[in-house]
Amino acid sequence: MKIKRILIICFFISLLLISAGTATAAVAEENETQITIDKADQSNSATFSNVIVWEDYRNGESYETTDIYAHNLSTGEEMKITNNTSLKYSPVIYGDRIAWEDSRNGNWDIYVYNLSTSTETRITLNGSDQYSPALYEDRLVWLDGRNEGGSLDSNHWPEGNWDVYMYNLSTSKGTRLTSNESWKTFPAIYGDKILWIDGRNGEPLYSHQIADGEIYMYNLSTSEETRLVTNVSSDVRPDIYGDRFVWEDDRNGNSDIYMYDLVNSTEIQITDNESEQRYPAIYEDRIIWTDYRNGNGWDNPDIYMYNLSTSEEMQITTSESEQWADDIYGAKIVWTDNRNGNYDIYMFTLGASEEKPADEEPVDEEPAEIDSVEELKKLKAHVNSLDIEPSAKDLLNIKLRYVIHYLEAGDTDTALIKLGFYIECVSIMEMKGRIESKEANYIISEAERIFDIMQNA
C-alpha cells in the first residue's frame, strides 16, 4: 500500500507542475452578493465556512472607533462581536473563533471571540503592542513588540524589533518562536507551518518605510526555521494553504503574484501582466489577488483568480469602482468594495462555469465514472459517520467534494489529483493523531481502490 501511495502522490504532483503563464482572463459569470448595506465603511473581511467577519465603522465618528462584525450566510444573521469604543483591526476567523487586534487597554492586544460560547478572551496581557493575528485550528500567531521595543506608530505601522509568538487556545500555552533582533511583518499559518516577512538581513524598518525583507518559515513539528524567499517588500502579505504559499513580488519592476511549492521547493510566477497585482490569498487550487490592469495607474482595481488545476485566470469583478481582495474559502471570495460611495463587503460564489472551461465540449459519463462517483459518495458518508473532530471531518469533506465535482464534470485527470491530495491529507491526519490508524487505513485503502477504478476507466 505504501508503494502505491507514493506512486499516486508522484502522479498528481507531476500533473500539477504545469506552466503558469497566463493568457487573456475569462470573465466570471455574475454571481455577486452584497454582504453589508450600512452607509458607514466596512473593510478588511475574512471568511471561514459560512461566516464572514470584517472591521466596521458604523458606531463611531471620524474613524476613532471600530467594531468587529460577523455575518452568518446560513441564517442571514449579522452579529456585532465587540462592544467597547476602541479601535479594532485585522479580524481573522477559523472554526468558531474570531481573533483581532484591539487598542482598548492603551496599547494593542490580541483578543479572541468564541461564536459557540459567546465569550471574549484577552490573549496578550503585557503593556507592549501586539498585532497582525493569524489563526489555524487551535493555534493563534501574531507579531509581538515586548522584546527590544517594537511598537506601532500613529498610522499603525510597525517600528523597531518584533517577534513571532504563538498561543495554543486549547492548552492556554504561549510560545515565542523568534529571538533575533529585526522587524517582522504579516505572519500566516497553516498546520505546522508559520510564515512571516523578516528583516534580519537588511535595514531597520522605520515609519512607513518600504524595505526589503525575506520570507521565513517555522515548522512546529521539527522546531526548524527556514529562509525561503529573499528580497521581498516589507509590505508583502504572504498566505499559505497546505504545502503552497503565495506572495506579491516586485522583482520584475511591478508587483506580481508568485507561488512556492514546499514539497518540490519550486517557485512559480502566477501573473505576468505589467500592471500591479497585490494582496494574494490561496485556498486549495485557487489564488485570488487585487489587480490594477483595468485602470489608469492605481484606479479601478479588480479581483482576479487563478486556478492551478486548470491553468486558467479569471476576472471576478467588473464594476468600474475599486475592489480589494480580502480572502477566499472554498467557493467563496470576499473583498472590500467602494461602488456605493462607501466601503462595503461583497462576496462572489464560484460555480460550475469556473470549474470547467467555457469552450470545453460536454463529456458523456462512462459507467465506470458513474460507479466511481457512487463509491466516493459512500466513502464520504462513512467519514461523516466517524467520531472525529469536526474540523478534520470538514476538511476531508471539502477535498472529497472536489473529487466528485471534477469527476462528474468529466475531468478525470484533475479528479485524480484531488483524490491524491485527499489520500495524503488522511495520512497526515493519522500521523498527527487526528484519525485513528484503523480508520485511516480503511479510508486510504478505499480511496486507493477508487483511484484505480478512475485511472483505468
Image (cartoon, rainbow, N blue to C red):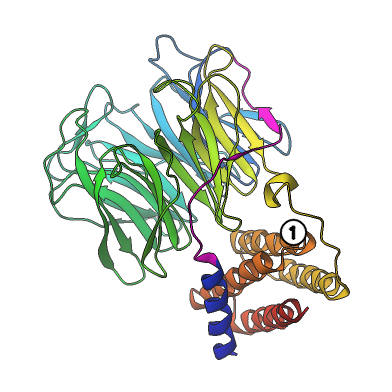
Check disc 1 and report its element: helix, strand or loop: helix
Is residue 18 found inside the magenta-colored segment of the image?
A: yes
At horizontal 28% and vertical 45% (from top left) the residue drawn is 251
At horizontal 73% and vertical 35% (from top left) the residue drawn is 75
Instruction: Please indicate whether residue 251 sits to the left or right of residue 16 in the image.
Output: left
Is residue 225 found inside the magenta-colored segment of the image?
A: no
Closer-to-camera residue (94/82): 94
Residue furthest to the top in view is 61
The quadrant of the picture occupied by the N terminus is: bottom right
Q: Where does the magenta region start and end?
A: 16-38
The chief SS type of the magenta part is: loop
Instruction: Please indicate whether residue 136 sits to the left or right of residue 265 in the image.
Output: right
Vertical relation: 352 (above or below) 42: below
Does residue 16 appear in the picture of this structure?
Answer: yes
Image coords of residue 245 (percent x, y): 42, 55
Closer-to-camera residue (381/364): 364
Closer-to-camera residue (61/207): 207
Label 1, on which residue? Answer: 405
Instruction: Please indicate whether residue 389 sits to the left or right of residue 217 in the image.
Output: right
Image coords of residue 179 (percent x, y): 17, 55
Instruction: Please indicate whether residue 311 sits to the left or right of residue 157 in the image.
Output: right
The quadrant of the picture occupied by the C terminus is: bottom right
